[in-house]
Amino acid sequence: MRPLVIKVFGFLFLLAVIAGALSLLPHQSSPNDYMAGIVQKHARLDSIPGPRLLLAAGSNMAFGVNSPRLEKELDLPVVNLALHAGLGYQFIINELEQSMDSGDIALLSLEYFLNDGDPRLRQRTEEHFPPAANYHELSLFQAGRLRLENTRTQLRQWLQGAVKKSRPPRQNPIYHQSAFNAQGDIVSFLGKENPTLLKGRETVFFRNWEAIEAMNRLAATAQKKQVKVFFLYPAFAESEYAKNKKVIAQLDGVLKTDLQLEIINRPEDFVYPDQLFFDTVYHLNEQGRERRTSDLLRILRNQTASRKALEQAVAR
């Protein structure tokens, strides 16, 4: 019995040594990874003195607005920080909180009931842009699970290294680092045909949304920094809105009561026919993003608080 126990412990020790050695290897992210787009966005952010118009969201805003047009018509430089909803609401809100400066105007447009996101996606982002590590904290459980998944990924990469070297990496035609224009909008899909099916269809269930507390902390910080932050409902496909209308109305009631950011649009304002969306129920196509840009300009000019904030920013 004792020799068997010794062999088992020896095998486990060997696995631990291999895992430890693999954990020291750098994670092999693609140099043209879509998440690397954050580097370009923050380079622009750092190069432009305020006041600025900052757009913070998941990919609904990355796909859903023509920032050069906003910039021209509002006479205010725009930085579109929106990247991926999978980063989670904390990452998006904390990134905005740490990026905004006195005199800025920010529009926050979270996807419905956006959750805490995917730690692996955040790690990929941090590999390209190390300051992103400050936008989110991992629990001990999440950190342990992520370490285990990384070790498994690194082992697979190590075993398949020879195969990968013999095959040139394939670039996704839409989602890659070069997909963005100078302001941070995704433009790689412009001129492309809509895919056959819209992804992301789901039934939304009402729950106490943790993001409200995080947004209220952002509101307090914005007041101290003299930044105007407004909440915008996201673009959403008409068929999905119809299916989830009651829950969205319930959420709207809660936000009007509990949210300390000013809400400057209605959920239905950015609801458009399905044919105006590209590949998901949140991603507008070229025609859709122009329509949303027009609607957004109308909202900003007609809504008293946002109009005054824009006038003050332009006057600086």
Image (cartoon, rainbow, N blue to C red):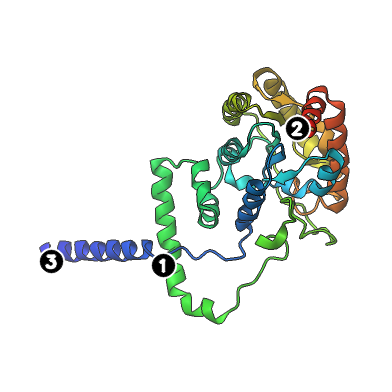
Q: Which label belongs to residue 316?
A: 2
User: Is 243 on the left-hand or right-hand side of 146?
Assistant: right
Front label number (3 vs 1):
1
* Amino acid carrying mark 1 in the image: Leu
Within 10 angstroms of label 1, few (less than 14), some, or many (20 or more) residues? some
Dot 2 alpha-carbon crowd within 10 angstroms: few under 14, some 14 to 19, many 20 or more: few
Residue sitting farthest toward the left:
2
Residue at the extreme bottom of the image, as rendered? 166
Residue positioned 12% across, 66% down in the render: 3
Amino acid on which the number 3 mark rests in the picture: Pro
**Which residue was labeled with disc 3?**
3
Residue 60, position as x, y percentages in the image: 73, 45
Disc 2 versus disc 1: distance between alpha carbons?
55 Å
Point out which mark residue 155 bears. Answer: 1
Q: Is residue 11 above or below residue 210?
A: below
Q: Is residue 315 above or below residue 24?
A: above
Q: Which element type, helix, strand or loop, lies under badge 1? A: helix
Task: Give SS at disc 2.
Answer: loop
Q: Dot 3: few (<14), some (14–19), or many (≥20) neighbours within 10 Å? A: few
Residue 177 image-quadrant placement:
bottom right
Amino acid at pointer 2: Arg
Name the N-terminal-most of marks 2 and 1. 1
Residue 224 image-quadrant placement: top right
Instruction: From the viewer's side, name the closer residue of 136 and 271.
Output: 136
Q: Quadrant of residue 72?
A: top right
Q: Residue at x 46, y 63 (%)?
A: 27
Q: From what the image shows, is residue 298 above or below residue 143?
A: above
